[in-house]
C-alpha cells in the first residue's frame, strides 16, 4: 500500500490547541506527518523565534510516534517534494478561511502538480481560535486556559513580560 507522507505547514506562532487537535486527527490518517514551521523572511514579525516555536511543538507532539517537527525556508512545494511527501495538510476553521486556502492550494498545485492539498476541520470548539488572537489575549493579560497547552501559556506570559519590561 502507498505510504502517505503529509506536511502540515504553518507559522505556529505559537502552537494552539486547535493546531494540536488537527495534528492528532491527521496522525491517525497519514502514515507520517511532518509539522513544518515556515521560516518567516521578516524575522521581527514573529513573537517567538523559530527555535522556540519548534521546541514547543516538539514537546506537545512527542506522544505521537508518526509525527515529527521540522522547519523550512522558501517555497512550500519545493520543501514538500524534497521530503518525498505527497500531501499538504491545512486546517479550515470557517468559511472565511476558505478563500485564502483555495488560492494557496491551487497555486501550489499549479507550481507543482504532484502536490495535493488536503483540508481537515478542527473540533468546533477551536473554530474561533488562532495564534494571532492568542498572542493578542496574552499581550492584554487575558485568560489562555483551554486555548493553548500549559507550557505555551507559560512561554507566552514570559515573552509578554519580557517585551513590556
Ligand atoms: O500559519 P500560516 O501563517 O497560515 O501559514 C502560511 C504558510 C506558511 C503555510 C504559507 O505562507 C506558505 O506556504 N509559505 C511558504 C512560502 C510559499 O510557498 N508561498 C507560496 C504559497 S502559494
Image (cartoon, rainbow, N blue to C red):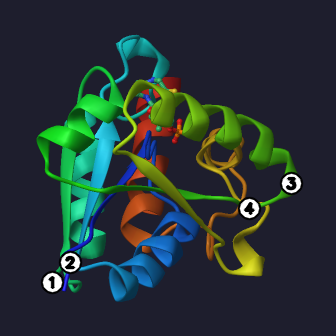
Disc 2 to disc 3, C-alpha distance: 32 Å
The crowd level at tag 3 (other Cα within 10 Å; few <14, some 14-19, many 20+) is few
Instruction: Identify which residue is drawn at 69% across, 41% down.
Output: 102
> Does label 1 or label 4 sit earlier along the sequence?
1
> Does label 1 or label 2 sit earlier along the sequence?
2
The disc placed on residue 2 is 2
Q: Secondary structure at mark 3?
A: helix
The answer to whether the residues at label 3 and label 1 have Cβ atoms under 8 Å apart is: no
How far across and how far down the image is residue 105, in percent? 56, 40
Mark 1 C-beta closer than 8 Å to ligand 1: no
Disc 3 to disc 1, C-alpha distance: 32 Å
Q: Please give the residue where the numbered disc 4 appears in the rendered image.
A: 93
Q: Please give the residue where the numbered disc 3 appears in the rendered image.
A: 95
Disc 1 to disc 4, C-alpha distance: 26 Å
The disc placed on residue 74 is none
Q: Please give the residue where the numbered disc 1 appears in the rendered image.
A: 65
Disc 4 vs disc 2: which is toward the camera? Answer: 2
For the residue pair 164 and 146, the one nearer the viewer reads as 146
How far across and how far down the image is residue 11, in percent? 44, 39
Amino acid at each position: 500500500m502507498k505510504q502517505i507522507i503529509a506536511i502540515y505547514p504553518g507559522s505556529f506562532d505559537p502552537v494552539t490547541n486547535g493546531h494540536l487537535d488537527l495534528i492528532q486527527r491527521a496522525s491517525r490518517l497519514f502514515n507520517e506527518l511532518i509539522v513544518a514551521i515556515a521560516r518567516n523572511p521578516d524575522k521581527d514579525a514573529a513573537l517567538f523565534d523559530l527555535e522556540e516555536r519548534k521546541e514547543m511543538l516538539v514537546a506537545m507532539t512527542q506522544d505521537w510516534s508518526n509525527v515529527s517537527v521540522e522547519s523550512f525556508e522558501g517555497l512550500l512545494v519545493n520543501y514538500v517534494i524534497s521530503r518525498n511527501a505527497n500531501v499538504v495538510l491545512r486546517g479550515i476553521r470557517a468559511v472565511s478561511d476558505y478563500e485564502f486556502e483555495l488560492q494557496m492550494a491551487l497555486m501550489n498545485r499549479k507550481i507543482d502538480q504532484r502536490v495535493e492539498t488536503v483540508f481537515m476541520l478542527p473540533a468546533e470548539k477551536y473554530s474561533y481560535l488562532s495564534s494571532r488572537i492568542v498572542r493578542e489575549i496574552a499581550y492584554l493579560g487575558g485568560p489562555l486556559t483551554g486555548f493553548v497547552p500549559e507550557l505555551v501559556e507559560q512561554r507566552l506570559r514570559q515573552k509578554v513580560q519580557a517585551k513590556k519590561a
